[in-house]
Amino acid sequence: MIKRILVTILVVTTSVLYSQQGTSSPYSFFGRGLQNFKGTIENRSMGGLSILGDSIHLNLQNPAGFGNLKLTTYSIGTTYTTLSVKGADESYNTDNATLEYLAVGIPAGKFGFGFGLIPYNLVGYRLTEITEEKRNQFTGKGGVNKVFLNAGYQVTDELSIGADVSYSFGSIENKVVSGRKEVQYGTREITTSRLSGLGLSFGLMYNKMITDKLQLRSSVVSSPSFEIRSKNERELATITIDQQGRESVVDKQDITIADRDMDIPAKLEVELGIGQPNKWFVGGEYGYTNSDDFTNRTVSLDNVTYENAWKFGVGGFYIPKYNALTGYFKRVTYRAGFRYEETPLHINNHSIDEFGISFGVGLPVRNGFSNLNLGFEYGQRGTTDFGLVREDFFNFSLSLSLNDKWFRKIKFN
């Protein structure tokens, strides 16, 4: 029964993810939009760390973690975001809700594999430019989603390796409506890009007990550069706009626009940490993105460039007593972290930096290994200097991780 339910959820979620608008950020205007966090809510609550791979939680950032699974795991995550955007002269508030991921992990001895669906990039903005002569309105929606298949293998008790094969797909629509004062007609340009491509990444995890209680954990994830295909269409129309803002088409025509391949940058992430198994952990992450060759999809902007970028994060967890027979909160997992990122996007010769402070809890469900995870993050993106805008965001995330045992040995007396 649970397998049928999961298949139904996966089909429904595919259609939802394909059409949802998970952001209202002006910075999603550029490139393929804002890149969504790839990991689980558990990872996100620890500053984005992907170093932890255990027997009952999925690790969507490092496929080597699937080699450590001992129970079949189903995981789903959602996030509600409030966003405050502030420029030099004005500001506004908005909010969005999005499904973060839906994934299943299945162990088979030292081998484990998993599959699922996550949003990869998000586009959603509404910008207005007003001058003495004209008014331009820019809107965008859509994004890129990713279907993935992960596989991990536990080479030894200390070493696990893995690979991630993914297919990215989606559609992004950008619309520009221009009108001049005291002129009856305006113009509307709609550009639609349908994106698709295959990706690959590799992961490694190495864990070693260095004392009777302390364990050293390390993780490496490498994602080679790959190409994503963009099939582009453009419609140009003459329109009228009534007082309620509704558009009526007077005349329209399709404009030929070239398709193009986009290079998705190569990435490397390295993590190291120390802790006591099932008790506490603290670690750090450094990531590098080789993105100086990246370009926009359909138009080149003089004040926008993409450069190599980096990020770092620190975080960890604490469990008072994971196997306590009494005292529910002794078995709760407490998480916290911090991250800072210099994104590849540069506008007016200034990088768009981002940071976040996060914390969360993992609440055991019943007496088994399943858990409900709550995550909270406050952060900022951009700045009000240099003609840019600053975004203050707050993320409230919720995930459910359910465990089951599919393969059991049957014994006969």
Image: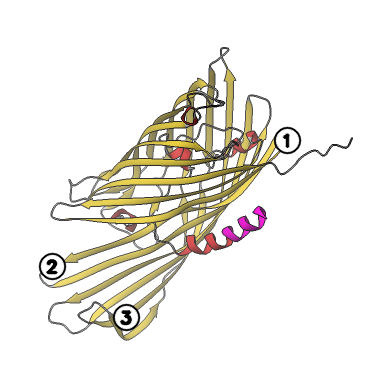
What is the image's colouring? secondary structure
Residue 237, label in figure: 3
Image height of 38 relative to 122, above or below: above
Image height of 383 relative to 193, above or below: above
Question: Foreground: 155 or 2?
Answer: 2
Pick whichever of labels 2 and 3 is earlier in the sequence.
2
Q: Name the residue tied to disc 1.
A: 109
Give the spatial CA distance, label 1 vs label 3: 60 Å
**Label 1 packing within 10 angstroms: few (<14), some (14-19), many (20+):** few
Spot occupied by residue 135 in the image (x, y as percentages of width and height):
18, 71
> Measuring 61% from the left and 34% from the top, which residue is drawn there?
55
> Measuring 54% from the left and 19% from the top, which residue is drawn there?
215
Can the viewer see residue 111 in this picture? Answer: yes
Question: Quarter of the image containing the C terminus?
Answer: top right
As helix, strand or loop, the secondary structure at mark 1 comes to: loop
Q: How many marks?
A: 3
Q: Name the residue tied to disc 2.
A: 131
Q: Is residue 5 magenta?
A: yes
Q: Is residue 3 magenta?
A: yes
Pick whichever of labels 1 and 2 is earlier in the sequence.
1
Spot occupied by residue 87 in the image (x, y as percentages of width and height):
18, 52
Quadrant of the rendered image containing residue 26: bottom left
Q: Amino acid at mark 1?
A: Gly
Magenta stretch prevailing secondary structure: helix
Start-end of magenta stretch: 1-10
Image height of 354 relative to 209, above or below: below
Left or right, residue 136 beside residue 36: left
Give the spatial CA distance, label 1 vs label 2: 66 Å
